[in-house]
Structure formats: C-alpha cells, structure tokens
Image (cartoon, helix red, strand yellow):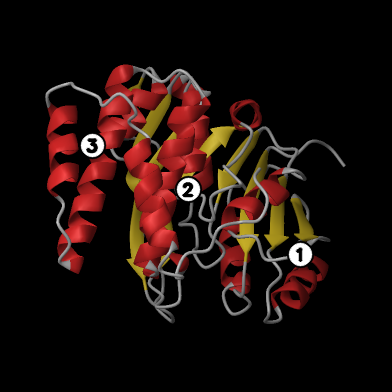
C-alpha cells in the first residue's frame, strides 16, 4: 500500500458507542487521498476493540481508507495510548482526534491547505460542542480565514491553545517524540512539545472538531485535569531551554489555576498569588518548578489522580 497522505491518531478507552460516528466523519475527509486511521485501545472494559475490528472489516475494502488497530494490555491513559497509535502512523500529516468527537466536513483538507499555503508545521482550529443524537450544525470548513504565527511555541502559549484540535506535519510530531507518557492526559504536553519542535503555527477561525459533551470524560475529573496540566508544564520546562517569556506565561497560568483551586477548597493561596504576581512583572523564582511539584503531590494525595506507571 502507498504512503498515506494523512494519519488520524485516535486513543480509545470505553468509547464503543461513539466509534462508528467518528469513523463516518473521518472517511469523508480528503476523499481523493489515502487516509490511515490509527486507533490505540487503552485496555477498554467495554467492547471497543470488537467494534474497532468490525469497523476495519467494514471500511478497509473502501478505496483510500486503512484502519489500523493497536491494543494495550494495560490501561495507561490517553497520553500513552496516543503514543501507541503514533508508533503505527506513516502519513505525511498527523491529525489528532478524541474517540468520542467527530470532524466537520472539510476539516482535514482545510488544515492541510492552511499548512501548505502558509508553510506552517502545526495547524489549530476552533471547536463546537454537541450532545448525543444531535446532528452536525457545523458549516463545511474552508481555509479562507486563518492567521500564521512564527515562532510557533510563543504564539501557542499566548493564545492558550491546548487540547486535541490540531493537525501537524509528521516530521514535527516525530521530532517532538509524541506526548509525555509520564502524564495521564495528553492535552497539554502534546501541543507544547510539537509547537516547540515547529517553526510556524497557523490558526483557523472555523471549528475543526465537534466535541461531545459527556459526563464521563476524563476532563470532568478536575483534580486529574489540574494535576496533568501542572505536571505537563513542569516536565516541559524541565526538558530543555525554553524562552523566558514562554516560561513566565506558562507559570502564570499554572499559578492562576492553583490559586483558583485553593480558593474553591477554602485553602490559603497567598504564596501562590505572590508567585503569580512575580511572573506578571517578569520575575521568576529561583526554583520555579518546585511549587508545581508540590501542588501535584498534594493533588495526587487526594487519591483521585491517575499517574502512569511508565514514562514515555
């Protein structure tokens, strides 16, 4: 089989009811190009794996569709599952998608066109929300309106672009070494790493993904969400030389989140607010990562936080 034009990277955990709708939204993307859909099941306890094999049998005979399925014997989280799916991806572009979401018509083609017109390495877009049973209300995505930023990382941080609603050139994702596998959720580490390995970022105004509003999503666990945000930033800053202004913005966001959390718990956040103010005036503490580590440990001690066994 020839090299795919685009690989869709889809981690799966207990999403059996949503997979058919997702695949139907993918197979109509870039219809004249070979599409590889790389699923990685994260030891689902429902029948997600069976559904995936049924979908592969249903669609793999269709021209320009190749469904690839990997399965982890152990539940390690969406970041590790993303990296497992990436290990099988061979396309020129990698489009990251959550298993319970769906893509509006034209989303992939418009993101690729924005890449090719602007020379961007990573393309972000907006999102729309839907509930089960609701038909798509998104207009066909076109690349008519997008902005380009260089360098990519400061713009991504300044515009607060996190979450899985982007496409990137395969070479940049490979250079970034995927998501941080030591953090359960990939929503922060993955775009930070890829942007750091990229020169140019494009941002489409249109919604490029439709996000399902579901009560059982990982992001509904606020302790996990905050822990993984802080740990992803902590590890990213520890990995290499990051521009001081980017450090300052990232730490400021972390301190803001910690302060809000502590306020909601009725816990004093005075020291955190002082640290936040320091980043506003351009001052960074001697050990800026220590407070993030301490807060992560505090959150982990609640027992409501998953930490993967093995780093990636």
| Vertical arrangement, residue 158 with respect to residue 106, above or below | above
Q: Residue at x 75, y 43 (%)?
A: 87
Q: Nearer the viewer, mark 1 or mark 3?
A: 3
Q: In the visual, does 234 lie left or right of 56?
A: left
Residue 139 position, x and y percent, is 36, 56
Q: Residue at x 71, y 53 (%)?
A: 38
Q: In the visual, does 185 lie left or right of 137?
A: right
Count of numbered labels shown in the rendering? 3
Q: Can residue 162 be spotted in the picture?
A: no
Instruction: Please tell me which of labels 1 and 3 falls first in the chain.
Output: 1
Q: CA distance from mark 1 to mark 2?
A: 20 Å
Residue at which label 3 appears: 252
| Vertical arrangement, residue 66 with respect to residue 112, above or below | below
Taking depth in this image into account, of 106 and 192 the one nearest to the observer is 192
Q: CA distance from mark 3 to mark 2?
A: 33 Å
Residue neighbourhood size for the residue with mark 3, other residues' Cα within 10 Å, grouped as few (<14), some (14–19), many (≥20): many
Q: Residue at x 38, y 72 (%)?
A: 213
Q: Which disc is residue 107 wearing?
A: 2
Residue at which label 1 appears: 59
Q: Quadrant of the C terminus?
A: top right
Q: CA distance from mark 1 to mark 3?
A: 47 Å
């Amino acid at each position: 089989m020839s090299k795919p034009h685009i690989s869709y990277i889809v981690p799966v955990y207990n999403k059996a009811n949503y997979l058919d709708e997702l695949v139907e939204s993918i197979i109509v993307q870039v219809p004249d190009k070979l599409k590889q859909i790389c699923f990685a099941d994260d030891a689902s306890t429902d029948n997600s794996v069976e559904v995936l094999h049924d979908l592969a049998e249903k669609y793999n005979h269709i021209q320009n569709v190749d469904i690839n399925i990997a399965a982890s014997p152990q539940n390690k989280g969406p970041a590790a599952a993303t990296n497992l799916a990436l290990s099988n991806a061979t396309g020129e572009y990698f489009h990251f998608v959550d298993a319970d979401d769906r893509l509006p018509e034209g989303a992939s083609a418009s993101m690729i066109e924005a890449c090719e017109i602007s020379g961007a390495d990573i393309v972000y877009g907006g999102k729309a929300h839907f509930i089960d049973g609701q038909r798509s209300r998104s207009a066909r995505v076109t690349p008519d309106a997008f902005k380009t930023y260089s360098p990519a990382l400061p713009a991504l941080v300044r515009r607060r672009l996190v979450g899985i609603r982007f496409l990137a050139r395969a070479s940049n994702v490979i250079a970034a070494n995927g998501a941080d596998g030591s953090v359960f959720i990939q929503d922060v580490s993955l775009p930070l790493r890829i942007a750091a390995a990229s020169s140019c970022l494009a941002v489409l105004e249109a919604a490029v993904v439709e996000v399902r509003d579901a009560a059982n999503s990982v992001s509904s666990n606020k302790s996990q969400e905050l822990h993984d945000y802080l740990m992803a930033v902590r590890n990213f800053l520890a990995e290499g030389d990051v521009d001081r202004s980017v450090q300052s913005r990232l730490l400021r966001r972390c301190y803001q989140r910690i302060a809000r959390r502590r306020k909601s718990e009725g816990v004093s956040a005075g020291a955190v607010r002082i640290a936040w103010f320091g980043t506003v005036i351009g001052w960074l503490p001697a050990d800026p990562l220590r407070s993030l580590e301490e807060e992560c440990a505090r959150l982990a001690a609640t027992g409501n936080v998953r930490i993967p066994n093995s780093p990636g």
